[in-house]
Amino acid sequence: MLQLLSIIFLLTSVQFTKGTSDTYLIYEKVGQYLRNYEMKTKQAIDHNSIYGLENSNKIGMGYNPVYGSPVCYTGVCQMEGFAQPIFKLQYQSSAPGSCTNKLVPNFVAADCLPSFVTSASTEVINTLKQLSESISNKIEVSIGAKYGQFSFGYTNSRETNYMVDNIVQNNLTLMYTTAQVSHIKLSMFEPLSDIFNHVIDNLPCCDSNDYDTEKYIRDYIFSYFGYTYVSTLLLGGIVQQNIFMNHDSYKRLESRNISTKNAAKVEFNILSSGVSVENSQAKTEHQEFMKEVKNSYGTILGGDPSIQDINEWSKTVPSNPVIIKFGIREIFDLLNKRRFPNDPQIQNKSKLIEEVLTKYIAQPLFCYNNCVDKSHGTCESSGYFQFGICKCNQNWTGLGRKTWAGADFTVCYKATTTKNSSSIVGGLCGLNNSGGKQSASIPCNNSIAGTCPNYIQSGYSLARSSLTVNGVLKYPTGFCYKSNSAYPDLPGTLCGIQWAQSVDGPACGGYNPGLSQCPPGYSVQLWVLEYGTRFHLCAKR
């Protein structure tokens, strides 16, 4: 243990002496300054939060688009990405002729907006492109294209991660319905904050390859302030509702000329205003729509969230507005002679920060399971959120390329049935596989493995499938299938098939075999594939 600690100490010592001693001392000195600032800020009474306009203090803050989440899809809205103040806000008086009697920061323009509820609008989101457009509509980004593509990435942005998983992994479509009240728009012309000035003034210049200099920029600029700042704020309130359904359900409804957008708006109006559906066709379509919904929830942001009626709620928004949209600009816009007239290196410092930023935002693509390894597939960019899609090598498939293609197949399953008649020609009974690294042994009517009951007595025939590799027969799989619907379902009749520990695949009567759930009279059975992955099935007892 002592030897290990010595090694760690030596490595740390070498690392921190990698840069110049002067640079390291500056790093420590500025770090102490920032810690003292944070301590004083915590101890001071924030009169601005008492008398100032709610959330107006977000203007002029640093913002880090790498970690940002400008849209609240989860319903738990923390507005990630906001950092320390880059500008100094001073609250002294309310804006003359303003729609609020609360204090607004000096040098901040306040434009009052009509406080009425906008008509509900619904976005259908089931592709990464649609998700990107939805996020882009909620934030005004004045940053270069080479940085914009790294904003709100899958790995670091919680909301993006949540939505991408639902779209790609869970195969869901989101109907995102919102109505909002705009209260006041703030635009800023403030002086820079003392802490931002201090960090820039003391920035060692100008070797981007120096370890301590790069650490200074990463820790005291990007981690502390971000690399953009909030230049405009739109305050108000939002009522929103998320409705999730399977992609296939969405396509099926649209193919029947049922507008999912209209049905989602109807549901939103019922919950937010108590408006009932009078039109019989609209009522029927709404009912059909709701049958396909897997998950839904609503969120009220701003105003008094305890008030359910949307029109009454809108009257409370001016007393408790939240951020409903904001704009950001690059901090490089601030690093100029006008703001730092006494710093002859300010242009070089700006270039230095930009060089380190290029390294900071460069992150590898994320692919589910990292495509397992190079023998399974390669991770290729989707074009959005630094999220990748695995491109399969031969004989592999699946999101994470962990599914051997020999076990990938399409199943037809009965979507509706009745207790009196569930028999169908082609229905499967039993499953036997005894080749290679696969295994399954589900007998049909207790028959010997790989055989079927007598056809004359049961109405079932034997079907086999196999894979031949280099002329060698591998992975033979046998089923019994019903050839005559006049015969009853036998013990061993299969119902539902899903990947283990998931709900990916058809369920059985509303029960998920992937979660080890089967209806009464059925038991969970396994089909173990190569590399240990498993299907779960329900089989009739």
Image (cartoon, rainbow, N blue to C red):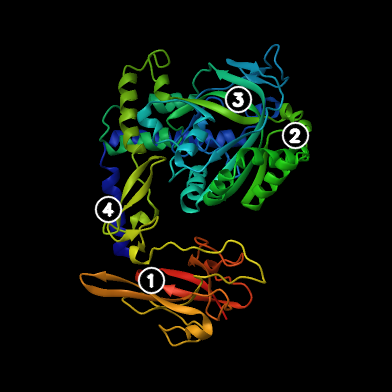
Tell me which label, 1 or 3, sits earlier in the chain.
3
Q: Secondary structure at mark 2?
A: helix
Q: Are marks 1 and 3 in contact (CB under 8 Å)?
A: no
In this rendering, is residue 332 above or below 425?
A: above
In this rendering, is residue 158 above or below 62?
A: below
Tell me which label, 4 or 1, sits earlier in the chain.
4
**Closer to the observer: label 4 or label 1?**
1
Tell me which label, 3 or 4, sits earlier in the chain.
4
Q: Are marks 2 and 1 in contact (CB under 8 Å)?
A: no
Q: Which residue does the numbered mark 1 point to in the structure image? A: 529
Q: Is residue 89 left or right of residue 337?
A: right
Q: Which residue does the numbered mark 2 point to in the structure image? A: 310
Q: Position of residue 376 (x, y in %)?
A: 30, 58
Q: Is residue 487 left or right of residue 168?
A: right
Quarter holding residue 541: bottom right
Disc 4 and disc 1: Cα gap in Å? Answer: 48 Å
Amino acid type assigned to the residue bearing label 2 in the image = Ile
